[in-house]
Amino acid sequence: MDITDAVASVLREVSLEVVEPRFASTDGDSWAKSPGEIVTEADLLAEKAIAIRLNALLPGVPVIGEESVDLDPHLLSALGAPRSWLVDPIDGTANFAARSSNWAMMISLQEAGVTVLSWIWQPMTPAMYVAELGSGVTRNERPLRLSDRPDAPLRGAVYLRFLDDVARSAVNERAHALDCEVLRGHGSAGVEYPLVATGGQDFVVVWRTLPWDHAPGSLVVSEAGGKVARPDGRPYVLDDGRFGLVAAVDESTWSAAASLLGPQSLGAP
């Protein structure tokens, strides 16, 4: 079994054994880890189970998990290692705890900080996305490639939570001027990026770009033929400390979506 199949199996196994049984019975096992952010018992148990399996696949390669980094931020320094794993055991934890189906499990493999493989597992769909740098992306083992976008008004998700009120208002004004429909978003990068990669929506714009949230989906969209970059056009580098990321089905759509953030986003730290 090659590594792409092996990691896909890891996600399916941990989902079936650890996560899905807790999906319908989450009462009392979730708590706030920071303002506006919750974690569940399923997150912690799934991350541990995934890490054990990944260590067995590639011994010595560090596993950087969202929940582990929450306890020890210094673990992020492992992104500079020759190879490293990023793990988001449940992306969309608030949805999971609320018994919404909009959540996913994600893993990516980095080489010298560059994402070379990624996996997004949506158990409720079910759908497995696997992307390899330079080799394309599959959905449930079938090649996935974006086709030409139809001539219709743009529609996509803009995550405004981490913008101030003035910036939010400006985004909405620019969207109105472009005749662009701004969607609220699904609360999960593991749902949002696959929607762009399949043409289900035209773009997604985010401000905070934690690596475990965006490394997997960024590779999925780019390998499907879309464009992913910082709002000023620079590549998405996982540990550059910058903010803002735009993923879109094609170049022109990316330019329109990036313009929603306006000039104040350019050169953000």
Image: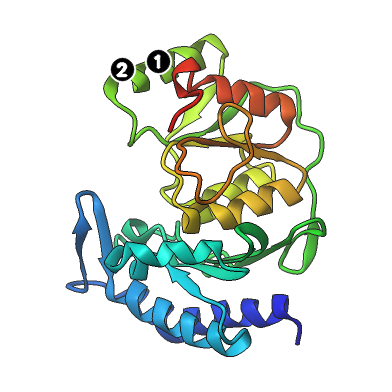
Question: Disc 2 residue type?
Answer: Val
Q: CA distance from mark 1 to mark 2?
A: 6 Å
Is disc 1 placed on a helix, strand or loop? helix
Counting every numbered tag in the picture gives: 2
Q: Which residue is mark 1?
A: 170
Looking at the image, residue 206 lies above or below residue 102: above
Does residue 99 appear anywhere in the picture?
no
Q: Is residue 152 left or right of residue 164?
A: right
> Which residue does the image show at 26% across and 72% down from the upper left?
26
Question: Disc 1 residue type?
Answer: Ala
**Is disc 1 surrounded by few (<14), some (14 to 19) or many (20+) residues within 10 Å?**
some
Q: Marks 1 and 2: CB-CB under 8 Å?
A: yes
Q: Which residue is mark 2?
A: 166
Is disc 2 placed on a helix, strand or loop? helix
Instruction: Name the residue nearer the viewer: 203 or 227.
Output: 227
Instruction: Name the residue nearer the viewer: 179 or 137.
Output: 137
Instruction: Name the residue nearer the viewer: 150 or 93.
Output: 93
Q: Quadrant of residue 168?
A: top left
